[in-house]
Amino acid sequence: MRRPLLPVMRLWRRNIQLRVVATTLVMSLGVVLLLGFVVIGQVRNGLLDAKVRASQSQATGGFAVAKQRADEAASGAATGGAAGTGTADGTSTTDGRQSQNVIQWMSDLVESLSSGGAGAFDVVTLPVGDDSGGGRSPRGSGYVNPTSSVPADLRERVNSGTTAAQSYTRIVYSNGKDSQPALVIGKQVNDPNGRPYELYYLFPLTQEEKSLSLVKGTLATAGLFVVVLLGAIAWLVVRQVVTPVRMAAGIAERLSAGRLQERMKVTGEDDIARLGEAFNKMAQNLQVKIQQLEDLSRMQRRFVSDVSHELRTPLTTVRMAADVIHEAREDFDPVTARSAELLADQLDRFESLLADLLEISRFDAGAAALEAEPIDLREVVRRVVSGAEPLAERKGTRIRVVGDQQPVVAEADARRVERVLRNLVVNAVEHGEGKDVVVKLAAAGGAVAVAVRDYGVGLKPGEATRVFSRFWRADPARARTTGGTGLGLSIALEDARLHGGWLQAWGEPGGG
């Protein structure tokens, strides 16, 4: 599931301009939404408050008109009833006529009250409770379904009190017209016979709904435009900052690749321009320092090479004289004889150091040549082990060879490989503290490898990367048996690299 998202995640991590623009868009969208909700709420409340006030005023006037007409009709009915004749059971002969007049009177009332609305409102009458006799059946203007349009809870409030009550509802029409939201205000009033009925005014909220929709659409369009505009502004602003940074990053990469002449293009005098100038000055100083170091390194390499070559002639003369003295040491007194032996030993060490310095100078100058030919590394290992046996016997160490049952053939320079292994084995014996040293050979997949393992003092944390440094010793106070020069592992590393291979060291205190 994460694999398709990896390019997007990588782009998100590496592109600061994308992160800033996306964050700006999200935050702008949040602010616009919050502002839109507040504005829409205020507009909605304002529209509804104005509608409610106008509707209440209209409904109050209508209720007063309905009461006035009922009183007038009742007064006329009373006058007409006094002139009527009685029947055998004593009831007025005008009762049936009065009931018929209430039916017509209720219909005329609904038509009269709704005629002043001109579509602004509708009028509905409902009987109190389930009493639909005496002409008080549900009536509504404008094809309004009276029972479905008036909420039941509003009817309960109207029937339980004498004041007007209001609620929000949806007007349902009997002619198939779509329902619409409305404000309904109702009150219980009396008909000409003095019997109560429910009178309701229904005020459609269609216009307010259209106005609110217009406001929502306007805010949405304006909000989207603002968000896009803020995103574009953020992109342009961040681009002015990110472009020089990207340029600096590209130039820094080229500088690290060795192209020290690269510089930033600086325009203006703002902070970015100051950054570019500082970067260029840093690059200039860096180029000068590197040039100085390269010159110094060349001088050092040349000095070491020249000194090493110049020392060979006097060293040869001193060696010849020392050999003559060493051969005649038996004729000297003991002190002079011992001095002759020490002179010969130190000359051997000096010759070894001089040879190593010459070899290092060839590596530094890039003049080291590889004379590779197919060789069996088992023979090289046997020669190295045989040469290290006297030292191992003095140290009480046994050198074991593992993996020499099969031929281990490689294209290599036998002299250089032997020098590498000799350094490794002698170092292992030196620091093995009398424990076994294991030399293991292996070949697989067109490559060969040799590992030298000891179980002596080991290396402290961080020393594994320093063992190949020139003249570095893990313990400067430790006595050396072989009198090494401190350049052996450095030369071994260069020999391995010259073969296209690698040389690594591992160790831990007490683990070899």
Image: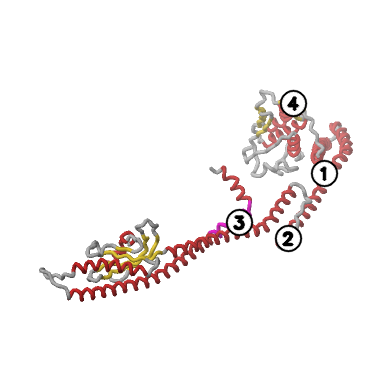
Q: CA distance from mark 4 to mark 1?
A: 33 Å
> Is residue 483 something one can see in this rendering?
no
Closer mark to the observer between disc 2 and disc 4: 2
Main SS type for the magenta part? helix
Q: Residue at x 23, y 69 (%)?
A: 195
What is the crowding at mark 4: few (fewer than 14 residues within 10 Å), some, or many (at least 20)? some
Q: Earlier in the sequence, mark 3 or mark 1?
A: 3
Image disc number at residue 316: none
Q: Earlier in the sequence, mark 3 or mark 4?
A: 3
Q: Which residue is mark 4?
A: 375
Q: CA distance from mark 3 to mark 1?
A: 54 Å
Q: Which residue is mark 2?
A: 273
Q: Which residue is mark 3?
A: 21
Place of residue 345 in the rendered image (x, y in percent of width and height, measured from the top left): 80, 36
On the image, which quarter does residue 455 sit in? top right
Q: Amino acid at mark 4?
A: Ile
**Does 24 appear in magenta?**
yes
Image disc number at residue 301: 1
Front residue of this view, candidates 302 and 26 = 26
Q: Earlier in the sequence, mark 4 or mark 1?
A: 1
Q: CA distance from mark 2 to mark 4?
A: 62 Å
What is the span of residues highlighted in magenta in the rendered image? 15-29
Q: Earlier in the sequence, mark 1 or mark 2?
A: 2
Place of residue 354 in the rendered image (x, y in percent of width and height, measured from the top left): 82, 38
What is the crowding at mark 2: few (fewer than 14 residues within 10 Å), some, or many (at least 20)? some
Q: Secondary structure at mark 3?
A: helix
Q: CA distance from mark 3 to mark 4?
A: 64 Å
On the image, which quarter does residue 335 sit in? top right
